[in-house]
Every structure is written in C-alpha cells, then in structure tokens.
C-alpha cells in the first residue's frame, strides 16, 4: 500500500455494443440501484463503444450491471481539481505535459471543476502531478 | 444459329444415353483400377464396374460429399500422377482447408469445349470480344472463361475483377460484346456507366452477360435488360466440376448439361433416393470424362429439377431449372462460396471470443456485404478502445484470409446473440434477388 493509493479512483468501464439506447439501459440499472452518477463519458470504437462512469458506489453498480448482462470492468483513474474559471484547464496543462494520458473528460462540481484522466502509469502519474503542485481528489470524495 | 460440336450436340436422346452408359462404364472401371479411394468406396458399397449395365445402375454407386474432398486434401482424390497434371485450381473448403482440383490436358480441353459449345449455343462466335471480369487465379471462374473464349476463336480481355472505370473504358474502346461476371457486378457496372454518362445500350456493343457465381433471378435478368439492353445468360459451374461449365442456349429456358461430360441425377436430399424427372431435389453429378479429379455421384448441395421435354433448340442434352436453393447453409457472396463453418473455424482461433456468432448478409446497392457478429468474452474486454479496435482488425483480417471475401466484424456483448437448440441458424440473408 502506498499513501498515494487514496488518489486511485474506481471508474466503471462498460462495453457498449452498437444498439440503440445502450446508455439509457445503463442509466436505468443505476437509477434502480439508487446509484448516483458523478461523471461519465462515451468512447466510440468501430461499431461499439465504451461507456465510462464514475459513481458513488462502484462495487454495487458493477454487480447490478453484470447481473443485467453488461460487461463491466474497473479502471483506475485520477481526478484533478481545476478552477472553475476561464483558463482553468490551461493552468493544468503545463504540469501534465510529461505524463502519457490515454483519455480524459471533465465535469463541473461547484465551486470547482474536475478533470478525470486515465494515465498509462498511474503511480508515476500521481507522483508527477503532485510534484507539479496539482491537487488530486481523494477517492473518499467519490466512493 | 451455329452449333459448336454438331456431332455431339445433335445426338438424339437414345444415342446420347447410350454414349453416357458407355462413358460411365469406362469411367467407373478407371476409378476402380486407378484410385484406391474410389476402389474402396465401391467395394464398401458392394458394387463393381461390371455391375453397371444400364444408366439406372448408376444409383448403385456410392455418393461423394464435400467432406470427402476435404478429407482428400491435397492429392488423395487425384487419379493422375504429377507428370500428367497441367494445372491446379483451389476453392475454399468448408472449414478452412481448400479443395484442390487438378487438371490434365484433356480435362482442360473438355472444360473449354463445354463452355465453347454453350457460348455458341446462344450466339457468340469468333467475331465477339469477351471481357472476363471473373477473378483470375486459384478461383476457376477467370481462367475457365479465358481459355474457352480462345478456343471459341473470340477475343478475350482478361480484365479480372475490380477497377470498374477501366472495365468501362475497355468495353467502350475495344467494342466488347459480352462480359463474364457476377450479375450483381454487372448491375454495379451499369450504375457506374450511368454516372459517367455512358449509355450501355447506345454507346457500347455489349449485348451479352455470362452471369453466374451467385444466386439471381429472372427479375434481375429483366432489370439488366431494361437498364442496359444486355441479355443475361445463366451459367452454372463449380470447381469440383472444373469451374464454370454449363449455360443456357438461346431459348434461355434451362441450363444444358452436356450429357457426354456429366451424368446428372436429382435425388431426395434426405434419403438419397433418385427422384422422377421434373421433381425438385438435390443435384448429383458424375463427371464422365474427367481424368485428374473425377467425381462420382457428387452431392452438389444445389436444389433444382431436370426438365425432360426436348429443348426447342434441338439439343437432347438435359436441362436444369434455375438453382432454387441449397440443402446446406452455404451462402454465396460476390461469387465466393462461404460456409458458416469456415467463419466459425476462423473465429475460434481468437481466444477473446465466445462460441456464438451470427452472419448477416445484405445487398447494398448491387454489392453484397457480410457482417460477422461475435460475442466478446468478459475477460477480454478492455477499457482501451485502441486495443479493442486492433482485436477487431485481427478478426477481420483472418476472416478475409480464410474466406477470400471481406467481412465487417461487430463485437457484441456476451449472451446477446441467439442461442439454438438443435441445428443453429447462424445466417441472416437479407438479400433480395
Ligand atoms: Zn436448348
């Protein structure tokens, strides 16, 4: 265990085939399980996609979705706090230039905004972002 | 209308049948004497060459199926040694292994002879320019028509497939009069011509389409004629027989099977019992003169019936109606035979996929498309889209290598494809002919 492990956030990655309203089907399961969605994004593949969701109760969410036949995986991501003002993202980018980011998405969480990133090497990523003076959100904020 | 080989083509029925019996006796004797495979088959069936005394006795001979060809890979069914072989062709087999067909000089001669008779029977001759837009290579469709055209004395343009603009240029500039192709490709060519402002009827001399390699209908024939003024001549063949072999005469009412080359039977697909003329059933073919790769009562898998009444063209050689279906689940896509078992075999090589799959065949415009849907195993799922795309690419490349026809691959969630009790129905063919 490293003390940095608290920055690792469990994101749900859900395989989504090319059928209408797959997102609706996922949202329905989460609603019925009284799971709160904190942020999400959809990635398009060739004829299928991956729905990425941050929820307040990832283990229960995974179990419910799996029971409904979805293919679900946990992926560890990092949450970077940014200023909810013009230039908020720009202020981060300089500190992030040395990390290899696979994907990212953002959402507002007043008074801040949050940038979620999936990095190639998460341990190194955490170290490098912290060293750059960025503020990472603790996973207790999520789960 | 000219006749290519009057001596054979004008034989009255009784004499044709006498010739068939004589050839069948000789052929079964050669198979018995030269081939351990056929010898053993006939012995197990309790029949010796001497037992063939009338044509009806043919039904005592054992059947052959596609499985025999697969088990015989590559040379077990070849009845001549390498010194006498002039060529090989190959067609894709049912589970990935190809079927190899060898040809002696006489085999190649008879193949060209068969098509030369057919082409003459609907009016082609040495003044024609015939563009062969079938695939050249291992597939027998290209070279078959190529050498037959030369034997006929007509001019051949070995265009092979693809590059439709160039095909059109050749048709216009070299005054092509006939084209061998799949019917859907000819329709496609018609569309490209239209876009380029070429009126096939007025601006070209193209009048005949030698069409086969995929199922089609009289409705499509009418559309081709209305649109381009091209008469579509129905052609039947299979690599097991040599390649494309038999066509309609000018009457365009059934395909003539040259009786001196092939003995045709129609059997009940379930019992294997011969059916009465006119009844619909599975086509069974014995090639009477093939040397290198003879076939004995080969079950073609095609459903058709024999038309007994004499053809107004005067030929007593039996005719078959349009192919009305298959006894197995083989499908034909852009002229290529595809068996779901091949797809299954290919998909099985990917540990990331489950056991279920579905094949969806469609016709977009005039071109056939094939979609393969396969279930992704949960443990193979990754959040990384690039890896998933790469997996899909690998699956698609392997399919293309095995099938010789490209397929779009769709990965689906496990448990979503239909499950079957008993015989699986994995093919969804949405094409309309
Ligand atoms: Zn005729």
Image (tube, coloured by chain):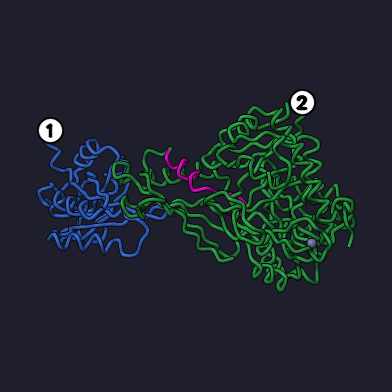
Chain colours: A blue, B green
Whether residue B156 is visible here, answered yes or no, is: no
Q: Residue at x 50, y 63 (%)?
A: B430
Q: Percent x, y for residue B328?
A: 52, 51
Q: Percent x, y for residue B71?
A: 56, 33
Location of the N terminus of chain A by quadrant is top left
Q: Which of the 4 image quadrants contains residue B382?
A: top left
Q: Viewed as shown, does residue B266 lie left or right of B96?
A: right
Q: Percent x, y for residue B112?
A: 80, 46
Q: Residue at x 26, y 53 (%)?
A: A70
Mark 2 neighbour class, 10 Å CA radius: few under 14, some 14 to 19, many 20 or more = few
Of all chains, the one bearing label 2 is: B
Instruction: Name the residue tied to disc 2.
Output: B83
Q: Which mark is residue A1?
A: 1
B191 lies above or below B59: below
Helix, strand or loop status at disc 1: loop
Residue range highlighted in magenta: B331-348
Q: Which mark is residue B266?
A: none
- Disc 1 vs disc 2: which is toward the camera? 2
Residue B340 part of the magenta segment: yes
Q: Percent x, y for residue B55?
A: 72, 47
Q: Viewed as shown, does residue B245 lie left or right of A33?
A: right
Of all chains, the one bearing label 1 is: A
Helix, strand or loop status at disc 2: helix
Q: Considering depth in this image, is A86 or B342 the residue closer to the camera?
A: B342
Q: Considering depth in this image, is A71 or A79 the residue closer to the camera?
A: A71
Q: Residue furthest bottom?
A: B226
B359 lies above or below B139: below
Residue A1 part of the magenta segment: no
Please state the quadrant of the image where ligand 1 appears.
Answer: bottom right
């Amino acid at each position: 265990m490293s003390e940095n492990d608290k920055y690792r956030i469990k994101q749900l990655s859900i395989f989504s085939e090319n059928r209408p309203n797959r997102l609706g089907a996922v949202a329905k399961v989460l609603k019925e399980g009284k799971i709160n969605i904190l942020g999400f994004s959809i990635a398009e593949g060739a004829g299928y996609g991956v729905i990425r969701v941050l929820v307040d109760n990832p283990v229960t969410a995974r179990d419910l979705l799996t029971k409904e036949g979805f293919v679900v995986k946990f992926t560890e991501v990092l949450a970077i706090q940014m200023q909810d003002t013009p230039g908020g993202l720009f202020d981060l980018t300089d500190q992030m230039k040395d990390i290899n980011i696979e994907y990212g998405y953002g959402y507002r969480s007043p008074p801040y905004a949050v940038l979620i990133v999936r990095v190639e090497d998460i341990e190194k990523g955490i170290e490098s972002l912290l060293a750059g003076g960025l503020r990472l959100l603790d996973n207790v904020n999520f789960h | 209308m000219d006749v290519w080989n009057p001596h054979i083509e004008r034989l009255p029925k009784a004499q044709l049948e006498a010739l068939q019996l004589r050839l069948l006796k000789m052929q079964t004797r050669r198979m018995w004497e030269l081939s351990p495979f056929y010898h053993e088959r006939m012995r197990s069936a309790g029949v010796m060459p001497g037992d063939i005394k009338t044509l009806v006795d043919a039904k005592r001979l054992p059947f052959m199926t596609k499985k025999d060809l697969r088990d015989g890979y590559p040379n077990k069914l070849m009845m001549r040694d390498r010194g006498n072989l002039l060529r090989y062709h190959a067609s894709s087999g049912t589970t990935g292994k190809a079927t190899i067909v060898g040809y002696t000089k006489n085999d190649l001669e008879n193949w060209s002879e068969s098509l030369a008779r057919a082409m003459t029977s609907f009016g082609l001759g040495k003044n024609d320019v015939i563009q062969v837009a079938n695939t050249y290579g291992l597939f027998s469709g290209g070279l078959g028509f190529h050498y037959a055209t030369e034997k006929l004395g007509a001019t051949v343009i070995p265009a092979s497939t693809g590059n439709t603009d160039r095909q059109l240029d050749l048709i216009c500039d070299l005054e092509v009069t006939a084209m061998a192709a799949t019917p859907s490709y000819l329709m496609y060519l018609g569309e490209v011509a239209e876009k380029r402002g070429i009126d096939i009827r007025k601006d070209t001399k193209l009048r005949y389409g030698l069409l086969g390699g995929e199922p089609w209908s009289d409705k499509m024939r009418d559309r081709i004629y209305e649109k381009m003024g091209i008469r579509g001549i129905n052609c039947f063949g299979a690599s097991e027989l040599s390649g494309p072999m038999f066509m309609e005469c000018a009457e365009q009412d059934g395909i003539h099977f040259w009786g001196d080359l092939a003995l045709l039977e129609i059997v009940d697909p379930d019992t294997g019992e011969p059916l009465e003329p006119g009844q619909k059933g599975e086509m069974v073919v014995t090639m009477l003169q093939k040397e290198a790769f003879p076939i004995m009562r080969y079950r073609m898998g095609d459903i058709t019936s024999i038309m007994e009444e004499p053809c107004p063209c005067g030929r007593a050689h039996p005719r078959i109606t349009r192919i009305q279906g298959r006894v197995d689940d083989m499908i034909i896509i852009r002229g290529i035979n595809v068996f779901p078992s091949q797809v299954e075999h290919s998909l099985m090589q990917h540990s990331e996929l489950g056991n279920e799959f579905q094949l969806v065949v469609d016709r977009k415009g005039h071109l056939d498309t094939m979609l393969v849907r396969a279930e992704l195993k949960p443990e193979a799922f990754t959040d990384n889209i690039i890896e998933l795309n790469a997996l899909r690419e690998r699956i698609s490349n392997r399919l293309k290598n095995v099938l010789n026809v490209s397929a779009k691959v769709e990965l689906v969630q496990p448990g979503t494809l239909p499950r079957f009790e008993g015989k699986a129905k994995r093919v969804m063919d949405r094409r309309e002919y």
